[in-house]
Amino acid sequence: MMKHRIKLVAAAVAASGVAAIASPAFAVSYASNVTKTGTTVNFILNSPADILSYSINGGAPITLDGTTKGAKTFNLTSASDTFSIIADRTDATGYTKLTGNTVAGGGNALFTASPEAGLTTISDDTSVLNRFSNPRGVSISNNPNAPNFGTVYIASSAGTVTPGTQTIAASGVYPARTVTGSGLYALRSDGSDAYGQGDAAKNPMVDGFPAWVDSSNNSPFRNYVAADGTVYVSDFSDANGSIIAVQPDMNSAAAVLAGFGGPTTLPVGQNHGSTQAVYVEGSTAAGNLKVYTLDEDLTSAQFGGASTTDQNSIWEYNIGSGPLSSTVTPTRITDAGIPLATSDMQRGADGKWYVMQTRNGALNSPTLYVVSADGSTVLFNSLDATRTLTANPTADRDILQYCNGVAISPDQKWMAMILNIGDVAVIPLIDGIPDLANKAVVSTTPDIISGRDIAFDAAGNIHYLSSGQALYRVLAPGGHSIATTTWNGTSYAFNVQNITTPVGLPGDFNSDSKVDGADFLLWQRGGSPTPLSQADLDTWKANFGTSAATVAASAVPEPASFVSGLTAAAFGMLALRRRQAKK
């Protein structure tokens, strides 16, 4: 279906209340796969940065070439040095920025028309590595201390083609590609081939057999990268239903749960069926591994319970230190009356579960539920929210119809959903609850079914898969932010800071509603609107001591002499810190 866009009058946009979608954005560029060998630091820059720099022991930033993405390196003065890598980028458009157009509803899209969000694609559609004929799942390693931080894992099924080779035809700027077998592909954050596998899917052996089968469209299916970098892959096929734990380099794997397959009557000793999705906390190394699955076949009755109809629930496997494969009895998490057609799940930073069902076009059927951390309470369902928003208590169509996958940003401020048509819906979260009134849609091309899966990386970029488009893409949020990857001598940390300055409060570079020493330090790190410029420093000096409250009250500015003195003191402290750092 062709999408029709209607130009909106700016006043109408403001009146609609959708301007909240243009709230502060995440960073786009960031340093991933950081390694330190002696005094040499290597990393991957996911996309070009306006300013790329590093700081040693908290010293002044040293500029690197950020005009190109890819492998970067710099040297420390000592192997014991600490350091930070800072990537600064501004995008005028992105999924948090409204274009002023609308995207029509209906068909294989959201049911109602939506404001259009900006499309900034930071992946390369002309790269053969981004073409997949039958992709099913995508996830990213988001822990800076994992060995594969920033690496993207794509699960692709060879479908029913024997012996598992599929050719994707060239179309426009999209190159042709022939892929072989069912399994995983891995890309670095810059889109390069992570482990040199080329066009052949990685399918490691488990108990002497390949982990996934070529005879199913759903083997493998969705995947999730745990905090330690292990890739957990679900298998939704009847013949091979399972969860497989794959090492970051994809050369070895282990069955997580006992047995293979998804029969309605489980064999003795098997503790799972066909699994649509997986989420993981902890690890066997730490002795605290918990694996959560959506399972098409399990019922409580199979494990001593009463219900024979609670398939497609979330199940928890408390595996601890192992071993794998585990025969532990699962515990049902979702018992809040969610229907049985669930197809994807995510968990927010505060523990809330986001459970969705692919019910394309179904009447009186919610697409999305938000459930409390213990699974006992439904906090939101999208059909009820639709009825409230439209003031129609008998509405039978959910606004979020035709959604095939859901993702939650690491800070739980955004939800993204991949639509059947291949577009991406973006919805702000307020205390973890979707703000459906302020939804927007990123209009992608070509318009063709089916969108398959979606995920956020650590910097807030959206990654999605579409088998209709035969593409993997990465969408930027837009705005001006700084992403910092830091080594403190023991571990890595990752931080994203928004630099949008509130209107009427010049000099407030960190957007905390006051102009103070923290804004000077941000200027010193290249985080002001015009990085490291004298003009921004002068603005900070002229407005030091002001706040949103003082501006609102028309308070008298601090005396210039006081500001000058504090400016000198700040420079003095900075110089002292640099001298101490060099000792």
Image (cartoon, rainbow, N blue to C red):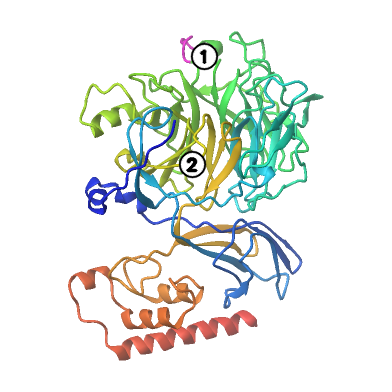
Tell me: 173 left or right of 94.
right
What residue occupies the far front of the structure in this picture? 172
Q: Which residue is mark 2?
A: 444
Which SS class for mark 1? loop
Place of residue 165 in the rendered image (x, y in percent of width and height, measured from the top left):
75, 28
What residue occupies the far bottom of the structure in this picture? 561
Amino acid type, callout 2: Thr
Q: Is residue 39 visible?
A: yes
Q: Which residue is mark 1?
A: 299
Q: Which region is colored magenta?
A: 304-310
What residue occupies the far left of the structure in this picture? 553
Q: Where 132 falls versus 486 (above or below)?
A: above
| Residue in front for this viewpoint, 221 or 251 | 221
Q: Where 527 falls versus 292 (above or below)?
A: below
| Prevalent SS, magenta region | loop
Picture quadrant of residue 48: bottom right
Q: Is residue 226 visible?
A: no
| Residue in front for this viewpoint, 476 or 354 | 476
| Label 1 Cα crowd, 10 Å radius (few <14 / some 14-19 / many 20+) | many
